[in-house]
Amino acid sequence: MVNIFGGSKSGRLAGLEISTSSVKLVELSGDGGGYRVERFAVEAMPRGAVVDGNIADIEAVGGAIHRMARRIGCSRDVAVALPSSQVITKRILLAANLREFEMEAQAEAEAGQIIPFSLDEVNLDFQVLGPSAASSQDVDVLIAAARKDKVQNVVDAVEAGGLNAVIVDSESFAMESAFGLVSRKLFGRDKRWIGALVDIGASGTKVTFLQNGKQIYFREQQIGGNQLTQEIVNRYGLSQDEAEADKVSGQLPDGYEQEVLRPFCDLLAMEISRAMQFFFTSTNYDEVDRIVVSGGCAQLPGLIDAIRARTEKNDGSQVETVVANPFASMSLASGVRFNNLLAAAPSLMVACGLALRRFDA
Ligand SMILES: Nc1ncnc2c1ncn2[C@@H]1O[C@H](COP(=O)(O)OP(=O)(O)OP(=O)(O)O)[C@@H](O)[C@H]1O
Ligand SMILES: [Mg+2]
């Protein structure tokens, strides 16, 4: 059975992300106290197969997974994720001395309160996070639920690709895990600071605010790399595929940088700064200490400077802004090329977070 938090896994397990523009896979192994990247792959997704995070065409998604798996020969067992918007989560307090089946019953009762459809229609799971800070008698428990049909959809697509989904997680949990790797490497173990993880993909931008490694606010906007590709199509009369390729290689006519790329980066930066304003007005926080940019668009030349120019701390100093690399502290297996991994790293956050599920206690 597939749970939101995971079922049985034996040995090897890879993280597989199914997203708008591609399927992405990361497989890690343990290496001393750290990790080694065994293999990774990105395979283009046929246009229209995934729309707004929803799998619209199971066969097409399965085909992309199959091509990728055949090319790299990965573990058959994979952890996959549902878009955060399809997973309902809540933290609850339960008495620490409850037995497993009692916790299960209480978690179900709580879930019944927050889920807008019948419990028969959902996959439900819960995870004990640890002793509660509020009361020594209680534990913090995270409950998560997703509609069975959405879970089944992902499981079917993975199966159509010849792999086996043994864990179905939430994208936001996977992001949190990967952010943990990035922030430990960059910012040490001081956990008081507020981080913003800005993921700019093909179809959307997701901004997650975190403290102590946990999400405290989330905002999603529908602006992403597809918009820039479309502008290139319109302006230079190229096909979608040509525009996409030329955008990534940077081989576009003079004037592109000034007239198209810069305004687009500035628009993204403005959206990020707006997301921050929403965060400040909706919470008690009034400052962000660090910004980590992930997703394929993190590679856009000039984007990081554009973000720096539109975000500042209350004392006028710059917010430290970097491109995400969840693999920075990892060793690489001999088949993994450093430069290829570095280029793909910002877009592999979710796949990497899922790959870490192999090491769950
Ligand atoms: N080197 C690059 N330069 C510019 N843009 C790039 C580069 N590499 C990838 N991109 C763009 O990044 C986007 C894909 O990023 P990513 O893989 O994070 O998206 P996704 O996860 O498939 O999409 P979404 O999160 O919206 O579902 C595409 O628009 C692609 O054109
Ligand atoms: Mg994405």
Image (tube, helix red, strand yellow):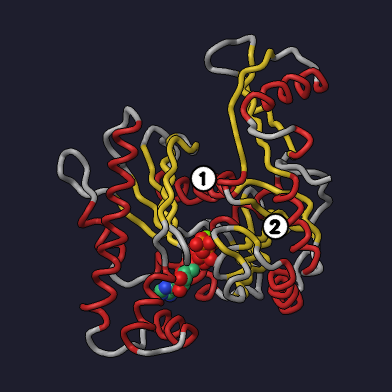
**Residue located 29% across and 90% down the image:** 253
Q: Amino acid at mark 2?
A: Ser
Q: CA distance from mark 1 to mark 2?
A: 17 Å
Q: Quadrant of the C terminus?
A: top right
Q: Which residue is mark 2?
A: 29
- Specify which label sits upstream in the sequence, 1 or 2: 2
Q: Position of residue 269 (x, y in %)?
A: 28, 58
**Is the residue marked 1 within 8 Å of ligand 2, measured from its CB?**
no
**Residue located 51% across and 45% down the image:** 180
Q: Is residue 262 left or right of residue 169?
A: left
Q: Position of residue 318 (x, y in %)?
A: 22, 49
**Residue located 20% across and 57% down the image:** 309
Q: Which residue is mark 1?
A: 180
Q: Is residue 327 left or right of residue 196?
A: right
* Mark 1 neighbour density, 10 Å: few (under 14) some (14–19) many (20 or more): some
Q: Position of residue 187 (x, y in %)?
A: 40, 45
Q: Position of residue 133 (x, y in %)?
A: 53, 17
The mark lying in front, picked from 1 and 2, is 1
Q: Amino acid at mark 1?
A: Gly
Q: Secondary structure at mark 1?
A: helix
